[in-house]
Amino acid sequence: MSWNSGDFYNQQYIGLTSYELQEQYANGNFMPSSFQFNSQQFYSPNEYLSPTVSSTLDEIENTEPPLLEELGINFEHIYKKTKSILNPFATPDSSILDDVDLAGPLVFCLAFAFSLLLLGKIHFGYVYGIVTLGTVGMYALLNLMASSDKPCSGIYTTSVLGYCLLPMVILSFASFVFRFNGFFGMTIAIIFILWSSISASKLFAASLAMIGQQLLVAYPCALFYGVFALLTMF
């Protein structure tokens, strides 16, 4: 089959003429009308959902809590609890008494271990071991002392003991500047131990309604934080 160029030129052209193209482009249409798209031609998933389903999905998206709230991290409670620990003689806020946040204790525990590491004391295992044994012991003791109406949970015990580790963190970082040796160092360490134990016993007594038993709770807390003071000094 041979190709004839005359047949090609004799075919009728059915497209737009050059004049029509000039007129169309002159009016601001930079795309031929046959290729212009309408936004309604694209796929929209909401068009295939019933109004009830669409409203339900919108309600779920609006009522979904933030990620930090799902993880149990509340910066306002962390600030209030830290402020209550820094002032051991102030009355704690009622909104933080039943708070079981573990973000703050984890930060303070890592900060204490990091300060020991900077001092050349690699005691990460000691820190976690003391925290674990002390938490279990305090949990058992508090459940024996508290009433059956307000039992103490292990997570709450860990949260309070971890938050009240803040004075020990301050003592550990202060050891970069001061040498806690001799009578002066022992006095400063005892002050920080009392600071931590009073703060912890205050939160335990207020949360568990242990009226008149704060001193009884402060004694085992002082033994617990005394071990951390020994790790800082020696």
Image (spheres, rainbow, N blue to C red):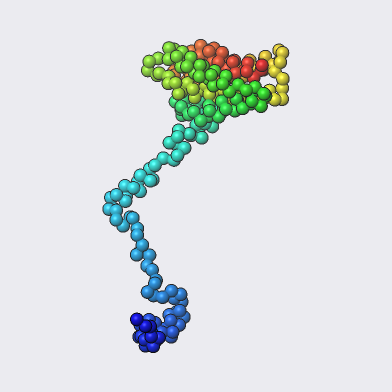
Residue toward you, 216 or 178: 178
**Based on the displayed image, in which of its 4 quarters is residue 5 positioned?**
bottom left
**Based on the displayed image, in which of its 4 quarters is residue 154 positioned?**
top left
> Is residue 110 shown left or right of residue 182?
left
Above-or-below relation of 107 to 32: above
Residue drawn at x 66%, y 16% as measured from the top left: 234
Query: Where does the image place residue 25, in percent across and percent down from the top left?
Result: 45, 79
Above-or-below relation of 95 to 19: above
Above-or-below relation of 226 to 170: above
Residue toward you, 93 or 217: 217
Query: Where does the image place residue 218, in percent across and percent down from the top left?
Result: 53, 14
Residue drawn at x 70%, y 18% as measured from the top left: 180
Q: Is residue 170 visible?
A: no
Quadrant, the N terminus: bottom left
> Is residue 189 shown left or right of residue 146?
right
> Is residue 187 shown left or right of residue 209?
right
**Based on the displayed image, in which of its 4 quarters is residue 122 positioned?**
top right
Query: Where does the image place residue 150, in percent across and percent down from the top left?
Result: 40, 19
